[in-house]
Image: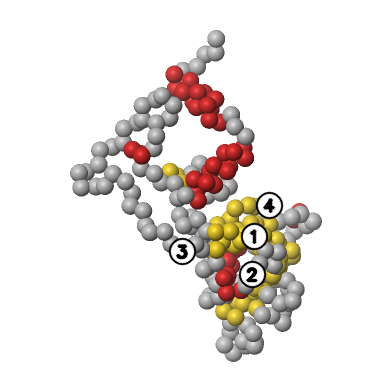
Amino acid sequence: MADFTPTQGRYLAFIHAYMCVSPPSVNQMVKVLEKKGLIDRQPGQPRSIRVRVPDDEIPPWNARKQGRSPARPDNQPSSVAVAPAAPPTSLYVVSVYLLSGPTSEKFSNKEISRAIEIRGDQTLEQLHHAIFKAYDRSDEHLYEFQFGKRPFDPDGPNYGVPDPQQRKKGDGDARTTKLDDLDLNPGRAFGYRFDFGDEWYHHVQVDRIDQAIPTVTYPRVIRRVGKSPPQYCEE
């Protein structure tokens, strides 16, 4: 007979009852719970799921008695107040591919990309900061999003932080331009240029447009492919 402690036995029972299911089933249920605002999580980050339902509203697992929550003061409500539902907000899922930059040979001919979710009411500047963080950069520089006839089209329209003295016709301000202002559709590609000295070029593609989850903080990275190259070769 197998030898295990009572605590180990409870874990075995839980795994046997609930975890012997296909990964797609688990993933789908997690997404449903998140969309309903019952849990929070950070995709790709282990042990990041947080239950938003009060303890006394969670049904007991199996036949075990539910653990008793700490007593609440008499004047504290037994459940968490839920804010009125906000109007649906569009959610853009974009893939950002690093195409060129001052990288060493060990990064050549390798896919380096990040998938980012960002709300339609957020700005291109917020997308810039999300890309900056996703590629583990530390030193800010000028940047530009290029929306011309091809992903890298200096003739524009382009969006960055305009210089009033050198601003070209058709240039936009990334600080005030929202994703919803750009009439984007799935499959649309555009360029992102960072650091006008070292010249990092990225290809950005709109993968799909969903509905944002009210309880999730955006923008957020949902997929990473490849290690981030150092921002400077000497690092």
Neighbor class of circle 3 (other Cα within 10 Å; few <14, some 14-19, many 20+) is few
3D distance between C-alphas at marks 2 and 1: 10 Å
Image position, residue 101 (x, y; %)? 72, 65
Q: Nearer the viewer, mark 3 or mark 1?
A: 3
The residue where tag 1 is placed is 208
Sequence-wise first label, 4 or 2 = 2
Q: CA distance from mark 4 to mark 2?
A: 24 Å
Residue 195 visible? The answer is: no
Residue at the disc numbered 4: 225
**Residue 36 shows in this picture:** yes
The single residue placed furthest to the left in the displayed view is 74
**Count of numbered badges drawn on the protein:** 4
**Mark earlier in primary sequence (3, 1):** 3
Label placed on residue 87 = 3
Q: Which residue is mark 2?
A: 184
Q: Quadrant of the N terminus?
A: top right
Viewer-side label of 3, 2: 3
Secondary structure type for disc 2: loop
* Amino acid found under the numbered disc labelled 1: Arg
Identify the amino acid type marked 4. Val
Amino acid bearing label 2: Leu
Residue situated in front as seen by the camera: 86 or 181: 86
> Whole-Å distance between the Cαs marked 1 and 4?
18 Å
Task: Name the residue: 38% across, 59% down.
Answer: 84
Q: Earlier in the sequence, mark 2 or mark 1?
A: 2
Q: Which picture quadrant has residue 221?
A: bottom right
Residue 2 image point, x, y percent: 54, 13
Q: Secondary structure at mark 3?
A: loop
Of the two numbered discs 1 and 4 in the rendering, the one whose residue sits closer to the viewer: 1
